[in-house]
Every structure is written in structure tokens, then in C-alpha cells.
Amino acid sequence: MPMPQVPFDDRGLAYGDGIFETVLLRDGQPVLWDYHRARLEQGCQRLNIPLPSAQQLVQTWQSPPTSALEVLKLILTRGSGGRGYALPEHVEPRLISRRMPFAANAERWQGGVCVRLCHLRLGHQPLLAGIKHLNRLENVLARQEWQDSRIAEGLLADSSGKMVEATSMNLFWSSNGVLWTPSVDHCGVAGTLRAALLAQGVIREGTLSIDDLPHSERLWVGNSVQGVWPVSELLDAHDNVLATWPMHNAPDPLQGEAHRLLGYREFPASESK
Amino acid sequence: MPMPQVPFDDRGLAYGDGIFETVLLRDGQPVLWDYHRARLEQGCQRLNIPLPSAQQLVQTWQSPPTSALEVLKLILTRGSGGRGYALPEHVEPRLISRRMPFAANAERWQGGVCVRLCHLRLGHQPLLAGIKHLNRLENVLARQEWQDSRIAEGLLADSSGKMVEATSMNLFWSSNGVLWTPSVDHCGVAGTLRAALLAQGVIREGTLSIDDLPHSERLWVGNSVQGVWPVSELLDAHDNVLATWPMHNAPDPLQGEAHRLLGYREFPASESK
């Protein structure tokens, strides 16, 4: 299937005027679809882009699967036209998609990951916070801060020194036996796995400052495609070790609930790379 | 000439990972090119995108002009590839361009314009401030705040209540006979006309709060394509009149210098719509 294209005057290209979703497909069926659809709807409302029909969305995963696990990426732009930033009189959104085979990294589920506290601080823009819009230069810049493949993710704080998320995952921590995630009211993306865990009462929204980050009981990063990675080591922006956490074989309450939602069994060899 | 396209995996589309320029062509030659090129270079440095060669850039305006005035839009993306936000091993930037005939709005030069103070406040992100990157959702949202065609531009303050720019123009004001423009160190775009006026010593960088905006001696908005529009009327976000300024036939020091730089004669009937 040829790769979809967009023309020069597409507003997604010109201004990042659109949203996207990255959806795990298991045996050709989307996982956590209700949450993806809800975030897509919220993004459309916030940006004032007409929502595609259910049929248009379903068609993006209607062909037979090529792999037990796949990732479906949807991009919805406001379409072409308009005079500069002004909208065209008739907005015709453009929905394009692509499917790729996927394999989860089960080693990271079990062995944990090393993460880095990024130098970049996320700016506040409440009108764009939470939705998965196409203006992602902050994430791109943050991801350029390291090349060492041993570092699995970068953690991002905001301009006021509060932790927000990782570059492409949400952040979770435990404190006094309760599981928490930062609010994403001022910046950051409200991940669908995070949304499902909040809805199930597994996690709560809380505040974690940069200074308190190394003193967390436990830390995790996760999203709806990769699942949940426990953090074993935290580096600062100069690669100094700020904290380490032992990985043990005791049940992991966050990963257990998350992987149940995603259909990942615990450490399944068949789904590892 | 067919409109250029970019594929689904282009990072300009996926993340707004790129920059653009909108250049006035007069008789097929770019106006203020040194300033456009300098900003392009600064954008490439900031985002770590290889700069196109001078030859690649010159080729975008090498065909014969179709109109005395044209607008050349360049989009430079980081190209395709990479794993998520991580860069591909070999970055191959994509430079695409389009030329359109243009006519300046001389009525606005002479009669002034009505502008509106937008509700949206620009977020601070010093790493992206000043450059003309493709993450422009704030501008798109601000431009959606009004439909009334009598309103020519929307003025934008930042989250700390300081004036920054207009949605697609820079802002200028006079105080005690001195001409000023806001700094763009925390947000906003450093326009090329603004840069040329700063370099010539015509304007200086200063601070203007929202509260002081209506009390300005005079206000202007302008860019390197449209030239400079004096502001005759300022509305708040509820369309209440905050201030008016009389338009008179006395020489306009800012517009005079700006239009000399752009090659616009004063109120030339032949270049009006």
C-alpha cells in the first residue's frame, strides 16, 4: 500500500494544525479504542476541527492484520486552504493513517529502564495541554538531548519545576502505597493508558517537583503501545546518577493493571523482541 | 506546476519539525533576502536541521515571475524517518516551495486598521522563540477568535501580560517620539522587516504591558510582505473599543522607513488591490 501524502497547502504541514493518535492493534483490533476516540474528540473540539465519522475511523483498521501486534498511526489535519492562519470557509479535514508491525520490549518490562531528566522545560499553554496535537517540537528537542541507547526515555518538567511526563510516555510514581501521575492541565499529553488507569481508580493526579523526583518510592513510564517500564536508574541532564531503584520479582501493581488493560501477559516471551 | 507533496512520515507533518519563510518577490527577486536567510539559518541551528545550500534556496525563485509582486513560501522540514521523536541516523531535510501572485493592501497603509486584543496568551518557550518554526497552533487558535473582516489583525500578549506580536505580523508602538517593538526572547516570531528596522536603528526593543497598550501614542502592525499598517482602532476580546487613533496625512516615520526597505512607494495606487 503506497504511503499517503499531503499537499504543500495542508494545514497540518504548514502549522501543525491537526492531531494524531498512535493505537496498538491486537489481532487487527484497536486496544483502548474508547480512550483514543475520546481524546481525538477532545482534540477536535479544542481546535475546532470536524470529527471524522465512526465509519471513517473504523476503515483505518479494516484490512487483515499482517502481525499479531501492530501500531496504527492516525493523522487528522484541518485540510487545505485558508488565508494564512485564518480558516478556509469550508473546512475539509484530511484523515490519513498507516499500520506497522510491532513487538513490545519485554526486557524493559522486567528489567526496568534508565531514564534521564531533560534540560528542556515544557512551556505552559492550557489551550493545547492534554490533547495530542501536531505541534511537537518540544518533544523533538527534548529527545535530541541524548544519543546513548541505554537511556530509554527523557523526563520532562515544566517551566515552574513540576514534573509532567516523558518525551513519548506518561510518568507515574508511588508515594505511601498510592500510585500517582502528574496533571496535564498546563502542558503535556493525556495518554490513553493514563486515562484508563485514572478511570479505573488505579492512579490519581498529583504534583511532583523536580527536587522530589529522585526521592520517589518507585517510578514508572508508560504508554498504550509499549506498556509500563519500571525505572531502575535516573540520570540528570549531565548524565550523573540521581537515584537508582532495585528491580525485584514482587508483583508490580501499576504494571499489572496496565498490562491487563493492554492485553499484555506478564513478561510473555512470545511478545518480546 | 503541480503542488509539492510530502509523505505521511515527513517530520514536518508529524511533529511540525521544520521551519518556513514567506518572502516578498519583486520582479522575481526576493526582498530582504539576507534577513530571511539569517532567520532560516538561526532556525536550522536551533532545531539542528542541516541548512540547504545557497543554490537550493536560489532555485526556488529562478523561474520567470508571473506578476510584479509575488509571495514565495518556503517550507524546510527535517525530512522523513526516525523512531518516534528520535532523529533518523541520516537526516535528509526536505525543502519545498510555492509562489503566488500578490497585491498589497494600500488602503490599509493609508487608512489604518482595526485590531483586536486576543484572549489567547502566548506560552513561554525560549528554545523556540524568535524562529519561524512549523508549530503554529497558538496563531491558528488566536486567528479563530474573530470572523469580522473589518478586524485586520489580532494582538497577542504572553502569559505574563506583556505584548508580543500580532497573529502574523510584528507589533510596533511609539513613546516620546521613539519607535519600539516587543522583544521575542520568550515567545513570538522575529519578523524580517522587524529585524531590518532594528538593524537600521529605526526601532528599539522594549516592553509594553497589556494595560499600557491602549495608551500608546501610536501603534502599528507590519511584516515583510504586507508592509506597515497604522492602527486606527483597538478592540478588546469582547469587541469593546479600547482606544482609537486619528489617521492623518503627516509623514509616518515607521511606515516610511519600512516601505523604503520593501520597495513600496508611499500609497502607490498601482500596487493596491
Image (spheres, coloured by chain):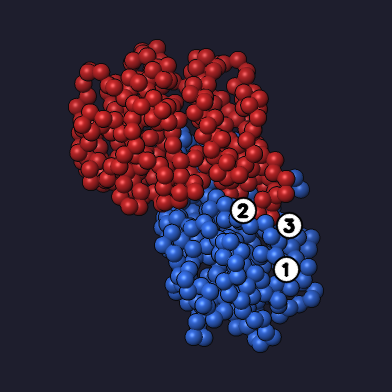
Chain colours: A blue, B red
Q: Is residue B182 left or right of residue A114?
A: left
Residue pointed to by mark 1:
A104
Q: Which mark, by number, is residue A100?
A: 3
Residue found 33% across the figure and 52% down from its top = B160
* Res. B243 visible in picture: yes
Badge 2 is on which residue? Answer: A144
Q: Is residue B271 left or right of residue B111?
A: right
| Residue B75 position within the rendered picture, expressed as x and y whole percent measured from the top left | 58, 35
- Between B169 and A131, the one nearer to me in the picture: B169
The residue marked by circle 3 belongs to what chain? Answer: A
- Please report the residue visible at 58 percent of the width from the left and 61 percent of the height from the top: A238
The amino acid pointed to by label 3 is: Met
Q: Quadrant of residue A102?
A: bottom right
Residue sitting at the far bottom: A250
Residue A184 x %, y %:
46, 64
Q: Is residue B24 above or below residue B147?
A: above
**Residue A70 at what x, y percent from top left?**
72, 62
Q: Is residue A79 visible?
A: no
Along the line of sight, which residue is nearer the eye, A235 or A57?
A235
* Secondary structure category for the residue under label 2: loop
Subunit of label 1: A
Q: CA distance from mark 2 to mark 1?
A: 23 Å
* Amino acid type at mark 2: Gln
For the point 73% across and 57% down, the residue is A100
Question: What type is the residue that disc 1 sits on?
Answer: Ala
Instruction: In the rendered view, tell whether residue B37 sits above or below residue A57.
Output: above
